[in-house]
Amino acid sequence: MTFHIGERPVGPDAPPLVVAEIGINHEGDPAKAHRMIDDAADAGVECVKFQTHVVADEMIPNDVVPGNADEPIYDMMRRCALPAEVEADLKAHAEDRGMIFLSTPFSRAAADRLAELGVAAFKIGSGECNNYPLVAHIASFGRPVILSTGMNDVASIRPAVAALRAAGVPFALLHCTSVYPTPPELVRLGALAELAEAFPDAVLGLSDHTTSIYPCLGAVALGAAVLERHFTSDPNWPGPDIPVSSTPEEFRRLVEGSRLVHAARGGGKAVLPAEQPTIDFAYACVVTTAPIAEGESLTAANTWVKRPGTGEIPAAQYPAVLGRRAVRPLAADVQVGWGDLGRA
């Protein structure tokens, strides 16, 4: 299932790809956008994501106000949309800092612009998951796709995945709850298992809108290979997504924690060779608790189990020595070996 965005592997065997979604938190100000790129890079983030809006190709004039805003979406997008030349500068800046530049196209024109810009992959937002014509158009460029699935169930995700498969592009599916902010009880990390069962060829991830990094860390334990959260340099900036955005310090901890949890997951319940030094002092083995004469039987009165675990007879075999006779005198507080014992 692993695929590459540029040279970066993305999949269950690689450390999670943490995506800092700058989105429209710049509020149309290129200086803010450039600052967030630098702050994300300084926090150890590998990927920044913007939104590409060509408003005339994206929507008709309207007065619909999003639930997390106080102005119509049409006005907001006209104010926050960045020109193509600014996006090119941002991409160059991100790549100069060693990061992957991604952006979400919200229209055909936006997808065409990003393809011409040379993005290594596309991110498709939850609102476009069931916009199958746009999904197919984006997939036609032949580049990897990260698809968020908020506001969609498995049935409505299937046609989008079919379009990606038909185009032969590798893809990741991000579970997402499109509630801003998302209460913990609505995150539903169990959906990762449902997506894995329905789309076994998909890399999985989480696009999170809570006010904490903890759901992302939990998602890693359940197999998430991509983690996306909104990013801001300053939580006091205006903007509809700022309340669900994490700071550079939170992203630093998210990167560190996600790598740690990834390294810790998997494996099985078996004794490790590396545990032997602990076994040596922590296990117990059979010892004498009183002097035992040659020919005397070992009993609960003169034999018990004590640490360290370096003796020949482990505590689990204590019942097997009771009633056996010593073939030589044994002092108190010595470890018993099988060669010290004769028949009962």
Image: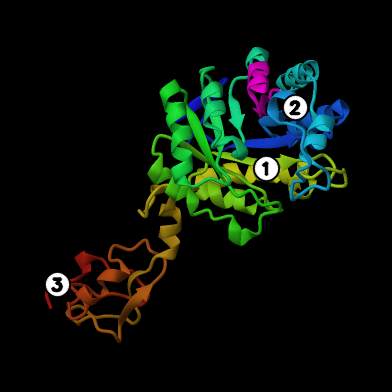
The residue to which callout 2 is attached is 55
Residue at 77 percent of width and 22 percent of height: 90
Classify mark 3: helix, strand or loop: loop
Disc 1 to disc 2, C-alpha distance: 24 Å
Residue at 35 percent of width and 80 percent of height: 289
Residue 71, relative to residue 57: is it above or below? below
Q: Is residue 288 left or right of residue 12?
A: left
Residue at 34 percent of width and 82 percent of height: 290
The residue to which callout 3 is attached is 342
Where residue 28 appears, as percent x and y from the top left, is 84, 30
Amino acid type shown at disc 2: Val
Q: Which mark is residue 177?
A: none
Task: Say which of 102 and 178 sits in front.
Answer: 178
**The C terminus appears in which quarter of the rendering?**
bottom left
Classify mark 1: helix, strand or loop: strand
Disc 3 to disc 2, C-alpha distance: 91 Å
The residue to which callout 1 is attached is 229
Give the residues in magenta.
98-114
Amino acid type shown at disc 3: Gly
